[in-house]
Amino acid sequence: VMFERLAKKGQDFEEKTREHINEYADAGLRTLVVAYRELDEEEYKNFSEELLQAKNSVSADRDEKVDEVADKIERDLILLGATAVEDKLQKG
């Protein structure tokens, strides 16, 4: 999902990062892709207001509304890389 959200200029290390993710997954590790996008003050303000409205919604489609707001902002991202952790089973 994350790779689909990258900006054209944010794909510099995509191929190598995909290789790393596959290596981590083959080793049984949980993977995490890290990317960012800078927002100007107006973009952040609009996003924050829309997200608050979606979160405060009492309708049955509240979760869908929150996802829609997130989808608007989670685009044109710049790839930073990937990391992985061992996710051991715990007792109980």
Image (cartoon, grey):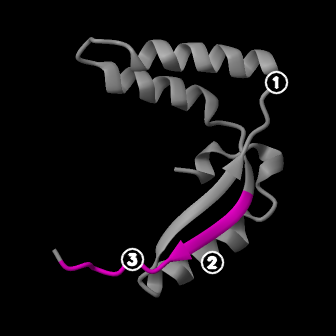
- Please give the name of the residue rendered at 71% of the width and 73% of the height, measured from the top-left corner: 16
Q: Is residue 52 left or right of residue 49?
A: left
Relative to 54, does residue 64 appear above or below in the rendering? below
Q: CA distance from mark 1 to mark 3?
A: 36 Å
- Please give the name of the residue rendered at 73% of the width and 19% of the height, measured from the top-left corner: 43
- Please give the name of the residue rendered at 50% of the width and 17% of the height, measured from the top-left corner: 52
- Disc 1 marks which residue? 40
- Disc 2 marks which residue? 20
Label 1: which secondary element: loop
Near mark 3 (Cα within 10 A), the count class, few <14, some 14-19 or many ≥20, is: few
- Disc 3 marks which residue? 87
Label 2: which secondary element: helix
The three-letter amino acid code for the residue at tag 3 is: Asp
Q: CA distance from mark 1 to mark 2?
A: 32 Å
Among the 4 quarters of the image, the one containing residue 20: bottom right
Q: Give the x, y percent position of residue 18.
A: 62, 70
**Which stretch did the figure color magenta?**
80-91
The three-letter amino acid code for the residue at tag 1 is: Asp
Q: Give the x, y percent position of residue 48.
A: 60, 20
Near mark 2 (Cα within 10 A), the count class, few <14, some 14-19 or many ≥20, is: some
